[in-house]
Each structure stands twice: as structure tokens, then as C-alpha cells.
Amino acid sequence: MFRPATVADAPTLAFHRYPEEVDAAERPPYAAWVAGALERGVYLGWLAEKGGKVVAGAGVTLLEWGPSRGDPQPWRGRVVNVWTDPDFRRRGLARELVTRCLAAARGRGVSRLSLGTTPQARALYGALGFQASGTEMTRVDPG
């Protein structure tokens, strides 16, 4: 089951952002930020659940960028916190969640998105229209 993230999910989203125990101290400030961002509508996230347990998640942060040369749209999106429980990987969950992020951004008029990636995830993001640029990937909606 897929559902939108809520303020109550902020600690889970912080874990997705910082899943390694070495980064555990980073979770509380991120959870506080993401709770506020959800309330302000500048963080849009989705979670996948199985048996009441969150098994995957993804979000998009909306950034007020300002119009730029060739693009009058003042907003950009950054896909973040793409995470899947190791026992649930390779089932299309990340693809579905990122697709939901892209649709939400498009619904807000955001056509330029970026994300950080790993070598393992490049194929997924490439299939969703992102172009590689160093460790960054960007995507521009044609329509």
C-alpha cells in the first residue's frame, strides 16, 4: 500500500535520509526540519507499507529557485530520501515512489528536478528521464 507521508512520519523520513548508525545524531534535526517542510507543503513524500510496516519511501523537496534563463518557473525540485528496506528491494517500490514524486512536482508546475545518486541507482533514475552529470542527475519535463 502506498500513502502520502505525514508530519507523524518525520522520524521515519529522517531514518531514510540517514540510515547508517554513524549518522544517527543527524536524524533529530532532520526530522524537525522535514516535519515543518511537510506542514508548509515544500516537502512531498510517499511511503510504501507492508503489514503496517514502512518498507520504502521517497520525497521531493520544492525549492524556490527563481526564474532563470530560458525557464520562467521559479521552483525546482530535489528528489530525496529514496530508501527501500533490503528485504523489499527489486520489486519496483522505489520506481513507483519516485514516479509519484515526479507527478506531484509536475502538478505544482515544477519541471526541473535533480537528485543525488549512487552507481546502483543510476539505471532506475535514467529510466525515469534523469540525465547524469557527475554524481548529480537532473530531469527536465518536456511538457
Image: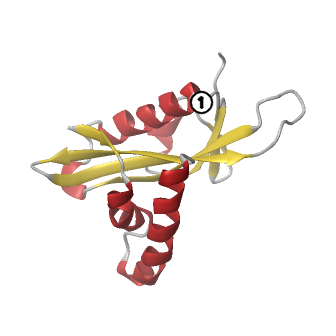
From the image, tell me which residue sits under label 1: 108
Tell me the amino acid under the disc marked 1: Arg
Which quadrant of the figure has residue 77? top right
- Image coords of residue 73 (percent x, y): 76, 31
In the image, is 8 to the left or to the right of 41?
left
Which quarter of the image is occupied by the N terminus? top left
Q: Is residue 117 visible?
A: no
In the image, is 118 to the left or to the right of 10?
right
- Image coords of residue 124 (percent x, y): 44, 37
In the image, is 108 to the left or to the right of 87?
right
Choose between 57 and 134: the one closer to the eye. 57
Identified at 36% across, 51% down, the residue is 6
Badge 1, how many Cα within 10 Å: few under 14, some, many 20+?
few
Identified at 53% across, 56% down, the residue is 37
Rendered position, 106 above or below 52:
above
In the image, is 41 to the left or to the right of 27?
right
Which quadrant of the figure has residue 100? top left
Q: Is residue 21 visible?
A: yes
Choose between 4 and 94: the one closer to the eye. 4
- Image coords of residue 19 (percent x, y): 37, 69
Which quarter of the image is occupied by the C terminus? top right
